[in-house]
Amino acid sequence: QVQLVQSGAEVKKPGASVKVSCKASGYTFSTYGISWVRQAPGQGLEWMGWISPYNGNTNYAQKVQGRVTMTTDTSTSTAYMELRSLRSDDTAVYYCARELIGAAGNNWFDPWGQGTRVTVSS
Amino acid sequence: DIQMTQSPSSLSASVGDRVTITCRASQSISSYLNWYQQKPGKAPKLLIYAASSLQSGVPSRFSGSGSGTDFTLTISSLQPEDFATYYCQQSYSSPPTFGQGTTVEI
């Protein structure tokens, strides 16, 4: 079955960097884009950006532009999200999600990884 | 960015109740609207895509409707496993944005 499995929880100090992985299985990895979405404690969902495993094209949210880098390794069907210069408000659960595109050009996220908790604390 | 506003923010319901959640976009998004269910400590799960298409494996008691700026998610007969938080999300333009969520409680 289609599955995305993420790396484990991280605790980082302010100013540090974190790199979260998302390993895909059950489908041809290069066929679908991967988005990253985060959720701060008790809050809603915030899209961070997207990457195409096919050609490496990316699209980042303005809020994290300049601090985030998304990459993929097609040999291992793994996507990565690196966030630098961490601050306390980056504390959140980070999700990867496969992006599907419909015939009309609309798109949706399915499935999602299980989430990776990143805590930023001194 | 397109703002998505859900109402209510939370609601109390009983098993067997018909539940309706609304989502309003700050501009027309055609039918580029998706619904997700999230249970505590779990990842979101896709329920409805393109406003009214039921994702494979999702029970038929879930349905979606609407186009333009106003959308609804309906649960025809609430089941115990449906107590969760529901999010709408627009895919009309980048960045994709989510509503603030609606929590369905007992």
Image (spheres, grey):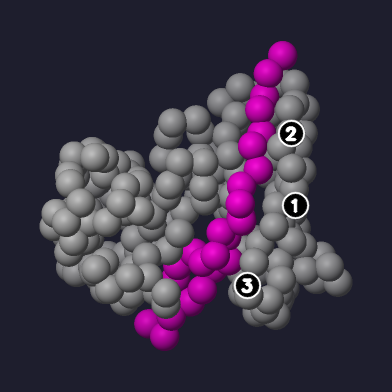
- Figure quadrant of residue A71: bottom right
Q: Residues within 10 Å of mark 2 (few under 14, many from 20)?
A: some
Question: Is residue A59 located in the magenta-colored stretch of the structure?
Answer: no
Q: Where's residue A48, x and y in %?
A: 56, 48
Q: Label 3 to label 1, Cα distance in Å?
A: 16 Å
Whether residue A63 can be seen here: yes
Q: Residue at x 61, y 69 (%)?
A: A33
**In the image: residue A8, left or right of residue A89:** right
> SS at mark 1?
strand
Name the residue that disc number 1 marks. Answer: A21
The image shows residue A118, relative to residue A68, as above or below, that is: above
Name the residue that disc number 2 marks. Answer: A10
- As drawn, the label of residue A108 is none
Q: Which residue is more in the foreground, B104 or A72? A: B104
The image shows residue A121, relative to residue B29, as above or below, that is: above
Q: Which residue is more in the foreground, B25 or A20? A: A20
Whether residue B28 can be seen here: no
Q: Residue at x 37, y 82 (%)?
A: A104
Which quadrant, please, contains the C terminus of chain A? top right
Q: Residue furthest toward the top?
A: A122
**In the image: residue B16, left or right of residue A64:** left
> SS at mark 3?
loop
Q: Residue furthest toward the bottom?
A: A103
Discs 3, 2 touching: Cβ within 8 Å:
no
Name the residue that disc number 3 marks. Answer: A2
Q: Where's residue A80, x and y in %?
A: 74, 54
